[in-house]
């Protein structure tokens, strides 16, 4: 449950997928974007890794998808929403 990080803006996130190849992360990104109508993108992280970047514009969608499954102790990992 701790493979992601909330960015400094408290709205965008990164899912840490460093153990996967770039093509595997791109495939995951494509599947998530297609299935859930998201706008995730693959970005380079620390030069040699690739991670999924979740823009703040998708924060509400992601929050609604995952919040029922997040343990309360990990809620600080969720984005701050503009309700």
Image (tube, grey):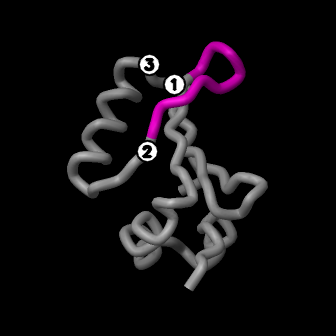
Q: Which residue lies under the disc numbered 3? A: 22
Residue 35 x %, y %: 21, 52
Q: Residue at x 40, y 74 (%)?
A: 64
Q: Nearer the viewer, mark 1 or mark 2?
A: 2
Which one is nearer the viewer's eye here, 42 or 83?
83
Q: Secondary structure at mark 1?
A: loop
Residue that sits furthest to the bottom in the current view: 83
Q: Examine the image and state in which quarter residue 76 appears.
A: bottom right
C-alpha separation, residue under disc 2 versus residue under disc 3: 14 Å
**Looking at the figure, which quarter contains the C terminus?**
bottom right
Give, as a single range, the part of the protein colored magenta: 41-49
Instruction: Tell me if label 1 and label 3 are in contact, CB under 8 Å.
Output: no
SS majority, magenta = strand
Above/below status of 66 relative to 31: below
The label shown at residue 40 is 2
Q: Of marks 2 and 3, which one's residue comes earlier in the chain?
A: 3
Q: Is residue 44 magenta?
A: yes
Q: Label 2: how many residues lie within 10 Å, few (<14), some (14-19) or many (20+)?
A: many
Residue with the mark numbered 1:
19
Nearer the observer, disc 2 or disc 3?
A: 2
Q: Residue at x 40, y 28 (%)?
A: 25
Q: Is residue 15 above or below residue 17?
A: below
Q: Is residue 76 magenta-colored?
A: no
């Amino acid at each position: 449950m701790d493979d992601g990080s909330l960015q400094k803006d408290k709205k965008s996130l990164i899912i840490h997928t460093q153990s996967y190849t770039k093509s595997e992360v791109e495939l995951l990104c494509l599947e998530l974007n297609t299935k859930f109508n998201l706008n995730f993108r693959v970005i380079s992280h620390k030069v040699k890794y690739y991670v999924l970047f979740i823009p703040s514009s998708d924060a509400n969608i992601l929050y609604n998808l995952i919040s029922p499954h997040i343990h309360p102790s990990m809620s600080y990992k969720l984005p701050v929403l503009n309700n």
